[in-house]
Image (spheres, rainbow, N blue to C red):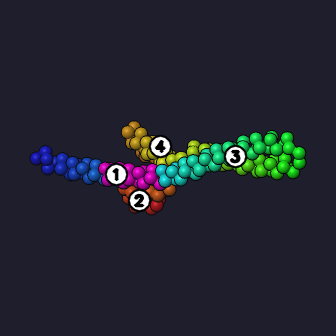
Amino acid sequence: MLARLFAPQIDALVERLQRGVALGIEVAADRVALAQLEWQDEKRRLARLLVGLLAAVWLAGLAVTFLGALVIIACWDTPWRVWAAAGVALALCLGLAWTVAQVQRLLRQGEQSFALLRRELAADLETLRRLREGEAPAAAPSGAPPADATPSTDPAHP
């Protein structure tokens, strides 16, 4: 008798649990996909950073070599050798400065890594916190109604 009395409530509870688990799995799959996309972006950024660092080290070595040659050539008789060595050394130093600026820009971009995933996970945690405290979850940022919302039949509230 009690089983028949509570059967509709138990069925409704089981259905809600199933929907909740399905929604949780869907959200987790979305977060994993987002993490994969952002990891691909991060790998590309790190590869460019590595190339930039290698170029900076190589250009620094060349700049030091040519600056040393400039000092040696400055002791020779003709001033053309000095100007040529100075021009090459200056060009290498400018290349080094540009490369260092690019590497610094890439390093600053690292602070933005996984920003979208972090923001989504923070929103998920906030929703879970509100649900745990018994509050209604915050409205979806896209302005779309929740999936389980039913249209109102009241003409005053469309």
| Residue 113 point in image, percent of width and height | 53, 47
Q: Earlier in the sequence, mark 4 or mark 2?
A: 4
Residue at label 1?
25
Distance CA(mark 1)–CA(mark 4): 17 Å
Mark 3 = which residue? 62
Please identify, in this view, whether the residue under mark 4 or under mark 3 is nearer the observer. 3
Q: Nearer the N terminus, badge 2 or badge 3?
A: 3
User: Does residue 55 appear anywhere in the picture?
Assistant: yes
Disc 1, SS: helix
Which amino acid, mark 3? Leu
Q: Quick one: SS at disc 3?
A: helix
Image disc number at residue 122: 4
Label 2 CA crowd tier, 10 Å (few <14, some 14–19, many 20+): few
Region in magenta = 20-38
Horizontal and vertical percent position of residue 146: 41, 55
Which of the 4 image quadrants contains residue 152?
bottom left
**Disc nearest the viewer among 3 and 1:** 3
* Residue visible at 57% across and 45% down in the picture: 110
Q: Nearer the viewer, mark 2 or mark 3?
A: 3
**Residue under the image location 28 percent in, 52 percent down:** 18
* x and y, in percent, of residue 84 in the image: 82, 51
Q: Are marks 4 and 3 in contact (CB under 8 Å)?
A: no
Q: Are marks 2 and 1 in contact (CB under 8 Å)?
A: no
Q: Secondary structure at mark 2?
A: loop
Q: Which residue is the site of mark 2?
A: 152
Amino acid under disc 1: Ile
